[in-house]
Image (cartoon, rainbow, N blue to C red):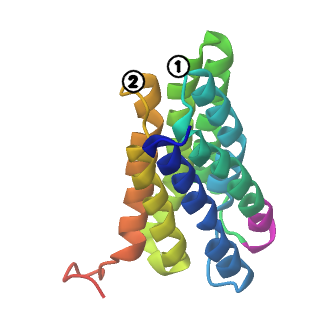
Amino acid sequence: MLTFGVIAGRLAGLLSLAAFVPYVAAILRRQTRPNRATWWIWTANGLVLGASYYASGAENTIWVPVSYVVGPTLTALLALRYGEGGWTSFDRSCLSGAGAGLLLWWVFNSPVVALVTTLCVDLTGALPTIRKAYHAPDTEDRLAWALFISGNTVNLVAIEAWRFANVVYPVYMFLASGVIAGLVLWPRTLSGTGGR
């Protein structure tokens, strides 16, 4: 049966997947330089996140995590040729954090612990892109990030049960994509006098 939550969840997944179209196009036009560390962490982590989130009971809101397996895999592959970063001490620290988070997931063997741990890993993976969006917002695609935040906003509406295991992923994704989208969509001048 197609309920409002089911429709919202599917729409959120489509918006999130659609965000990768302008992002990939901007990469191929060399207008966007994805951070290698971020996208490889998000690729590896996306699969674990999606599986643990589904195992925690999510149904309507599962389509955004599915899109965040497909899109980051393609982006990570493109980042090998067109991306930047991945080997600075900051990037290596983030990659080490991702490895530690995945180890904790294996040790605890719990969907909720895995979900929270992988969200922490995801945040670790986001840090290089947040840093890049802060210092060089023009190196990210504005339309893509507008679609990412739109998909994650709609996904909040699709939450079927307001339990921690069902809420933590959509809320985290809304906040994380919102920070990056905010930095990219409303860049400020370095003098602090406002936007461009």
Image-based side of 6 in relation to 70, left or right: left
Residue 170 or residue 58, whichever sits in front: 58
Q: Quadrant of the N terminus?
A: top right
Residue 178 % position (x, y):
38, 58
The residues colored magenta run 77-82
At 49% from the left and 43% from the top, the residue drawn is 123
Residue 147 % position (x, y):
50, 67
At 64% from the left and 35% from the top, the residue drawn is 50
The answer to the question of whether label 2 and label 1 lie on touching residues, with beta carbons closer than 8 A, is yes
Q: Tell me, for residue 167, which label it has, or none.
A: none
Q: Tell me, for residue 112, which label it has, or none.
A: 1
Give the residue furthest to the front: 1
Image-based side of 37 in relation to 1, left or right: right
Residue 166 or residue 168, whichever sits in front: 166
Q: Earlier in the sequence, mark 2 or mark 1?
A: 1
Residue 55 % position (x, y):
62, 22
Image-based side of 169 in relation to 49, left or right: left
Image-based side of 16 in relation to 179, left or right: right
At 75% from the left and 54% from the top, the residue drawn is 73
Q: Amino acid at mark 2?
A: Phe
- State the residue position of label 2: 164
Q: Secondary structure at mark 1?
A: helix
